[in-house]
């Protein structure tokens, strides 16, 4: 989650469900926690029994709403506006935890004079390049920081512990969020002004030396088009209130399925390696291990040890074959060449730029964001491999789909060769689950899979081994 990574160095959840019992206020947004995460919701119930106030923000009234002290029915997609309103409420009403801000955040740090906010530059920040559609962050640096042209050294900078300097982060933040008035929240979110102010008072009161509040969210935020910005706003709110790194505080990112967190950690995302290290890409930044480290290592903070993390991973991958002389096998890692995300490769597939696809553990023909496009794109492949417990819609798209029934696709004209393999269920293989709070639980195989059913590990290993043997023969 880049919004959390930008704020705290790592993109993982910052707390555990059972710590919610220590909260004085709990804000639940982007989640129907009571129904979709009932095991974790027990801690919300216990916190409320201890006197905590629960605020649920959701367009729909659900069981979570019924269990909350206050339900705010906002318009779908206006989450960021509401959070902006909460941040302004904190800043305008002195609800920030000043002692925490000065010692544990960058609120007192002074920003260089070159920085310009959005109201000064017609909606964009300074450093925007309209040709590359990207930002140059040189004008965002702290005053007094060295190494601005490379990896900046953030250990020395100018600051104002009184938070009064107009160029300090606190004052710039206050200026930026001044626009998010209760009237704007009412107009944009559809939440009556009095109801918003009541919710703001409840949650921002959970601040200071003796009180804390927690923010809980789920896929209602992570799958949003502006999810990164929404989660980043939640991080700003929690830091202003001093609610990070304290019992009953934090931002709890709920995961929607068993071990979906584990799949992220492995990782199954195309642009990262285990440990959330960025995937090397074709180009000058990844030609050598030294280039890669120089591009991604930070001078201070968590990522100052970037070189240790990547070397440790490479040695785990390649064992004795990895050495300092061969860059620990860095050259053997594959490179990414573009947008290989789910949406990206389905668009490529639809344009006829992909030959084949492996589908393991998902059913895109009915579970994707644009299932109709994805079913039509499957018809443009040369081959498709599906591994599952039963014949799912993705495996049968060529003969049994809405497009076939409507006559938009004809089985006789679809050139995709489909290979359907039986898979092993979770009880038929060893493995581990990683839950919402990042605890790993190993489980032993209960029974052998039937017939030719195999685990994903077996399948991928055997496929790789046979491809290597074929390469050696050729």
Image (spheres, rainbow, N blue to C red):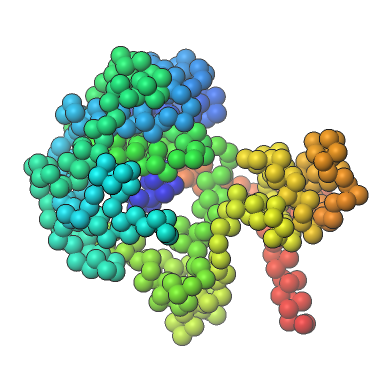
- Residue 166 location (% of width, % of height): 12, 44
Residue 292 in which image quadrant: bottom left
In the figure, is residue 126 to the left or right of 403?
left
Which residue is depicted at the point 77% across and 54% down? 380
Q: Is residue 25 shown to the viewer in this render?
A: no
Residue at the extreme right: 412
Left or right of 328: which side holds 48?
left
Measuring 33% from the left and 59% from the top, which residue is drawn there? 136
Looking at the image, is 262 positioned above or below residue 393? Answer: below
Q: Nearer the viewer, residue 242 or 288?
A: 288
Residue 159 x %, y %: 12, 51
Quadrant assignment, res 47: top left
Vertical placement of residue 460 versus 48, above or below = below
| Most foreground residue, 116 or 393 | 116
Q: Residue at x 33, y 47 (%)?
A: 124
Q: In the rendered image, is residue 411 in sight?
A: yes
The number of numbered badges drawn on the structure is: 0
Identify which residue is drawn at 56% across, 44% down. Answer: 260
Q: Position of residue 404 (x, y in %)?
A: 84, 40
Going by the image, does 219 lie left or right of 17?
Answer: right
Q: Is residue 193 left or right of residue 395?
A: left
Give the vertical position of 398 relative to 27 (above or below). Answer: below
């Amino acid at each position: 989650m880049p919004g959390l990574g930008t704020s705290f160095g790592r993109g993982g959840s910052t707390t555990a469900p059972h710590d919610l019992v220590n909260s004085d206020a709990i804000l639940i947004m982007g989640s129907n926690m009571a129904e979709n995460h009932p095991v974790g919701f027990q801690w919300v119930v216990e916190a409320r029994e201890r006197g905590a106030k629960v605020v649920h923000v959701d367009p729909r009234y659900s069981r979570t709403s019924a269990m909350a002290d206050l339900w705010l029915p906002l318009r779908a997609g206006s989450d960021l506006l509401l959070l902006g309103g909460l941040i302004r409420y904190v800043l305008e009403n002195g609800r920030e935890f000043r002692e925490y801000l000065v010692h544990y955040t960058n609120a007192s740090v002074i920003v260089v004079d070159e920085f310009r906010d959005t109201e000064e530059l017609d909606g964009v920040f300074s450093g925007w390049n309209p040709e590359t559609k990207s930002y140059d962050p040189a004008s965002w640096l702290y005053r007094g920081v060295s190494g601005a042209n490379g990896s900046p050294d953030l250990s020395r900078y100018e600051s104002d512990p009184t938070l009064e300097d107009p160029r300090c982060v606190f004052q710039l933040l206050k200026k930026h969020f001044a626009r998010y008035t209760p009237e704007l929240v009412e107009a944009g979110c559809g939440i009556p002004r009095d109801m918003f102010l009541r919710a703001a008072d409840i949650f921002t009161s959970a601040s200071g030396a003796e009180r804390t509040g927690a923010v809980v969210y789920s896929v209602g935020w992570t799958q949003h088009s502006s999810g990164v910005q929404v989660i980043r706003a939640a991080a700003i709110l929690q830091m202003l209130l001093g609610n990070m790194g304290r019992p009953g505080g934090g931002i709890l990112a709920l995961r929607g399925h068993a071990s979906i967190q584990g799949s992220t950690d492995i990782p199954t995302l195309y642009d990262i390696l285990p440990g959330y290290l960025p995937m090397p890409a074709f180009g000058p930044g990844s030609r050598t291990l030294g280039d890669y480290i120089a591009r991604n290592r930070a001078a201070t903070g968590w990522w100052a040890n970037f070189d240790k993390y990547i070397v440790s991973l490479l040695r785990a991958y390649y064992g004795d074959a990895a050495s300092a002389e061969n860059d620990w096998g860095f050259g053997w890692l594959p490179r990414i060449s573009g947008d290989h995300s789910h949406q990206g490769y389905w668009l490529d597939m639809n344009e006829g730029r992909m030959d084949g696809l492996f589908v393991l553990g998902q059913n895109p023909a009915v579970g994707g964001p644009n299932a109709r496009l994805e079913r039509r794109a499957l018809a443009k492949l040369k081959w498709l491999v599906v591994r599952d417990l039963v014949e799912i819609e993705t495996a049968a798209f060529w003969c049994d789909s809405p497009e076939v029934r409507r006559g938009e696709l004809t089985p006789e004209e679809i050139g995709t060769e489909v290979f359907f393999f039986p898979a092993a269920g979770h009880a038929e293989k060893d493995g581990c689950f990683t839950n919402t709070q990042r605890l790993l639980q190993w489980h032993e195989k209960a029974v052998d899979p039937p017939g030719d059913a195999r685990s994903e590990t077996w399948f991928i290993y055997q496929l790789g081994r046979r491809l290597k043997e074929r390469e050696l023969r050729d």
